[in-house]
Image: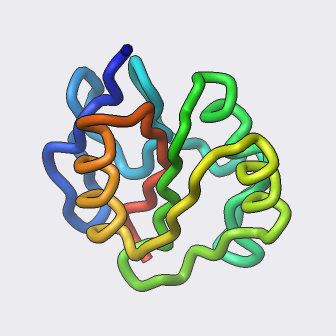
C-alpha cells in the first residue's frame, strides 16, 4: 500500500507535510499531495468544497477522506461533494482543521487516506 504523507505541523496559514514544500492549503492522497488551489474549481468559503476538488482524491484511490472546515469553521462543504465521495464508496469526515489533521494522521497509518486542508479561517 502506498502511504499517505503525514502532516507534521499546522499553524494559522502554514502547514508542513512530509515530502512537500510548506504551504497554506493542501490536497493530500496516498503517495503524495500538492498545494490546494481554490481557483481550480471556484472554491470559496460559501458554498465551500466543490465536487471537482475531491475528484483527484478519488482518482488516487482514497478509501477515506477528511475535509477540513478551516480554523474558524468558515469553510463549508457542498452536499454534492459529500454525495460524490459517498457514491464512490469513500468514508468521509468533516472537521475543524486541527481536528481534521489529527484524524487524517491517525487514518493515514492504516488506510488509503486523503484530505483537503485549509489552514486559515
Q: Nearer the viewer, residue 10 or 108?
A: 108
In the figure, is residue 110 to the left or right of 73? left
Give the vertical position of 114 relative to 9 (above or below): above
Q: Nearer the viewer, residue 21 or 77?
A: 77
Give the vertical position of 121 relative to 28 (above or below): below
Quadrant into which the N terminus falls? top left
Snapshot quadrant of residue 70: bottom left
Measured from the top left, where is residue 3 in percent x and y?
A: 32, 22
In the figure, is residue 99 to the left or right of 86? left
Measured from the top left, where is residue 36 in percent x and y?
A: 53, 42
The residue located at (38%, 36%) in the rendering is: 111
Measured from the top left, where is residue 37 in percent x and y?
A: 59, 43
The reply to whether residue 34 is in sight is no
Snapshot quadrant of residue 76: bottom right
The residue located at (68%, 61%) in the rendering is: 49
The residue located at (67%, 33%) in the rendering is: 58
Give the vertical position of 121 relative to 91 (above or below): below
Q: In this figure, which colouring scheme has been used for the structure?
A: rainbow
The reply to whether residue 55 is in sight is yes
Amino acid at each position: 500500500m502506498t502511504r499517505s504523507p503525514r502532516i507534521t505541523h499546522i499553524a494559522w496559514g502554514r502547514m508542513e507535510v512530509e515530502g512537500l514544500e510548506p504551504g497554506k492549503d493542501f490536497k493530500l492522497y496516498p503517495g503524495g499531495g500538492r498545494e490546494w488551489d481554490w481557483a481550480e474549481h471556484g472554491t470559496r468559503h460559501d458554498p465551500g468544497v466543490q465536487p471537482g476538488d475531491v475528484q483527484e482524491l478519488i482518482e488516487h484511490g482514497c478509501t477515506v477522506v477528511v475535509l477540513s472546515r478551516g480554523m474558524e469553521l468558515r469553510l463549508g462543504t457542498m452536499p454534492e461533494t459529500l454525495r460524490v465521495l459517498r457514491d464512490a464508496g469513500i468514508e468521509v469526515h468533516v472537521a475543524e482543521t486541527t481536528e481534521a489533521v489529527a484524524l487524517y494522521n491517525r487514518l493515514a497509518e492504516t488506510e488509503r487516506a486523503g484530505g483537503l486542508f485549509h489552514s486559515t479561517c
